[in-house]
Amino acid sequence: MRSVLFLIALAFVFTGRSQQMASLVHDGSPRVFHFYIPTNLQANESVPLLIALHGLTQTGSGLMDITQFNAIAEAEHFIVCYPSGLQNAWNANMNVTVSTADDKGFIEKLVDYFETNYNTNPSRRYLCGMSNGGFMSHKMVCESSYCFAAIASVAGVMSDTTFANCNPQHATPILQIHGTADAIVPYNGGGATGSSVQTMLTKYQQFYGANPNPVITAMPNSNLTDLSYPELHSYVNGTAAIRHVKIYGGGHQWPGINTLLGGAGTINMDFYAPQFIWDFLSTKSCAAVELSEHHPSLTLRSNNQFIWFEGIDSYAELHVFNALGSLYIHENIWGNQHVAIDQWPPGVYYIQLNGQHAKFIRF
């Protein structure tokens, strides 16, 4: 159900481009966001939405200036939104409290706003964030009922609270970009920040049923003066893609952006992070979004080895979809037949049986 949005729009146009600022009221507070609409957007056209989340002490407009996602949105035809956290922070359940705002609800309300007012595609919602914004992106994967087709985090992991309580309702593809010399959010974790990068990736790997050992691929080291180099780690054969760009010697920075405003430490200049992020995100979709937002009408029971169905006492056609909407099982069963699940990878599944449906989570 769409929330009622109280919108105060302050729109302005630069050189014919549709860059705008607006605010909406959430939880009693006005929340400001900037956004960019590609110039050739057609009426009733449904395009992807990227929500980009700034780091601690920063703002949405500042992130817009640093990353230049607007140029990518213009070239590749999507809407990008840069919201601002209250007091320049996101409530990502950080180990050191920086905000108590309901930012999960605010981000979900932004999704509703763009789908209602700009017809953005509900199967192509994306999140990315830097530092505190990266932490918030991971929190949304762990806690939101909304399906985000993929997220990307630069130098942000899961806080200890998010890690302990993480229970994703969707198998959301993950891209983690992180430097091994990050002194703000240490690669190996810390009491003030949360999990290590590897521990967090292992959590996703186990949830998605991917191979535990990543495929490691060298990336170009085209800049020999930046004191760092990237390497791609891919966790394969799971229900969702998990990719990690490990930057040896990299600091708390946006790779490819030579600015003092982005973070701290060594900046890797071997790839341009915003374009790399969009190239990853843009291939993903929530194909199961319509299934996930229906109320279940099928009652099922389960144990560690089987699921079975109540109220079905005849021959039935069974469809099982994974969280990304791919058909996992299609077979004919007798209604009260037990279906083996012991070989199913952990994750979220959507089950259809003779027109009835239910959601099932295997841990």
Image (cartoon, grey):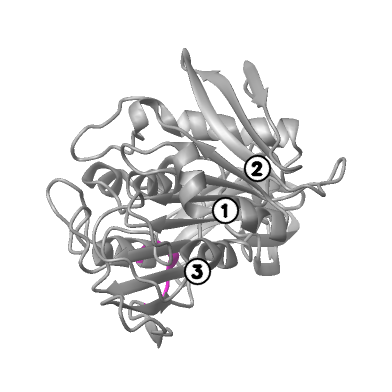
Q: Is residue 4 visible?
A: no
In the structure shown, which secondary structural element does the residue marked by tag 2 occupy?
A: strand
Marks 2,1: beta carbons within 8 A: yes
Q: Is residue 185 visible?
A: yes
The picture quadrant where one finds residue 247 is bottom left
Q: Earlier in the sequence, mark 3 or mark 1?
A: 1
Which region of the structure is painted magenta? 206-211
Give me the residue at 52% from left, 68% from top.
Answer: 276
- Mark drawn on residue 36: 2
Residue extending farthest to the front is 15
> x, y percentage for residue 96?
18, 37
**Distance between mark 3 and mark 1 Cα atoms:** 23 Å
Rendered location of residue 312, percent (x, y): 68, 49
Q: Residue at x 52, y 51 (%)?
A: 360
Determine the residue positioned at 64% across, 61% down: 320
Q: Which residue is mark 3?
A: 241
Q: Amino acid at mark 2?
A: Tyr
Mark 2–mark 3 CB contact (< 8 Å): no
Q: Earlier in the sequence, mark 2 or mark 3?
A: 2
What amino acid is labelled 3 in the image? Answer: Ala
Measured as percent of width and height from the top left, residue 169 is found at: 49, 48
Residue pointed to by mark 1: 69
